[in-house]
Image (tube, grey):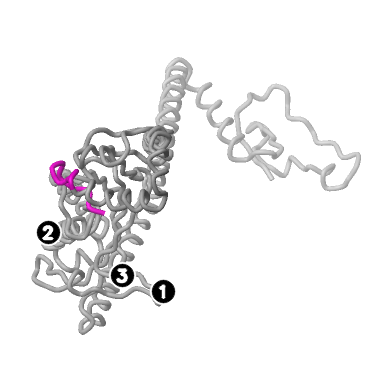
Amino acid sequence: MDYRRRPDEFDVDKLLESVGPTLRKLEQRFGGGFRGLLIPLAAILPALWLASGIYIVGPDERGVVRQFGAFTAITDPGPRWHIPWPVQQVDKVNVTQVRRMELGFRSTERGATLVREESHMITGDENIVDVQMIIQYRVTEPEKYLFRVWDPEGPPDRRTLRDATEAALRLVVGQRAIDDVLTVEKTAVQEDTKVFLQELMASYGTGIRIDQVQLQDVQPPQQVQAAFKDVVSAKEDKERLINQAKGYEQDIIPKARGEAERLIREAEGYKEQRVRQAEGDAARFLAVLEAYTKAKDVTRQRLYLETIEEILPGMKKFIVSPEAGGNLLQFLPLQEAGFPGTVVAPAPPTAPQSASTSGR
């Protein structure tokens, strides 16, 4: 249907010429009585004509009213009325339907068919690549969609959208090397193509909004596909190994930092312990020195006994007076050896006490 008819294209004379023969035939069939039917027909036909202007706009649609071919108004969903033909006409446009267009291939019952004149593109490093893409879009402005763009194949989502998509995609692919298009920058190609395509649709005034751009397949020419697959596999292995190394780095570095922190804390604790211990030893030494300066003999004897007690813990100790002869044979621990009733003679009471030790 051609939505772009000019208002001056409507010819009333042609309409009367086409209706006149029909009226004459009816008059001949009914004879003279046909003129008697003109009065009720004159009352019924206008009512039917006016009733023909009733139309219903669906919930997903918008009505575009044209008067003598020129755009007049947009109507919302619900029952509506317009001046019947030939004065006004209404075109209904679905504004919520997600439409789809394929570039570089066509889907058939037997599978996808490659369209090489659309899919062949030159990359920024002057290589050839086959790109297949799907465009999802909606009609958001019915007036522009129907009247603002002249498309030789119908509405602007036919040839116009396809040509604009091809131009946008060729521009985006032509700015990148073939390795990037085949591997790491597929998402960037989609996003850039969507942005540029939407700008084109807005500048053309098509009333179309691009919802999504999806790359279906990106391949080098068939003659070199094997070599490119090897390159892609090598790059994927490189990325995988890099990610593994980063994962190992992220695992080992926190552990090493934790271990280093633990050693630092242990060293600081040991340092604090040693400092406190040294300070205590120094204070104790100073106290002993002060006592020694006041009573050297007594302090020396006490230190000697404390040292013996420390190095010989848990043993019986006996003090033997030198005045008793200093001979250990005078001390016989016969009771400990199993001779009951044995008595050890005590030392003479008048002998002065001096320290000597023996322990077993």
The residue tagged 3 is 106
The residue tagged 1 is 109
Which of 307/67 is in front?
A: 67
Residue 263 lies in what quarter of the image? top left
Looking at numbered disc 3 in the image, what kind of residue is underneath it?
Arg
Task: Find the magenta span and give its range.
Answer: 1-13
Looking at numbered disc 1 in the image, what kind of residue is underneath it?
Glu
Quadrant including the C terminus: top right
Mark 3 packing: few (<14 Cα in 10 Å), some, or many (20+)?
Answer: few
Magenta stretch encompasses residue 6:
yes
Q: Position of residue 15 (x, y in %)?
A: 23, 47
| Mark 1 vs 3: CB contact within 8 A | no
Q: Position of residue 28 (x, y in %)?
A: 36, 52
- SS of the residue under disc 2: helix
Measure how far apart labels 1 and 3 are at the Cα level. 10 Å
The residue tagged 2 is 171
Quadrant including the N terminus: bottom left
Looking at numbered disc 2 in the image, what kind of residue is underneath it?
Leu
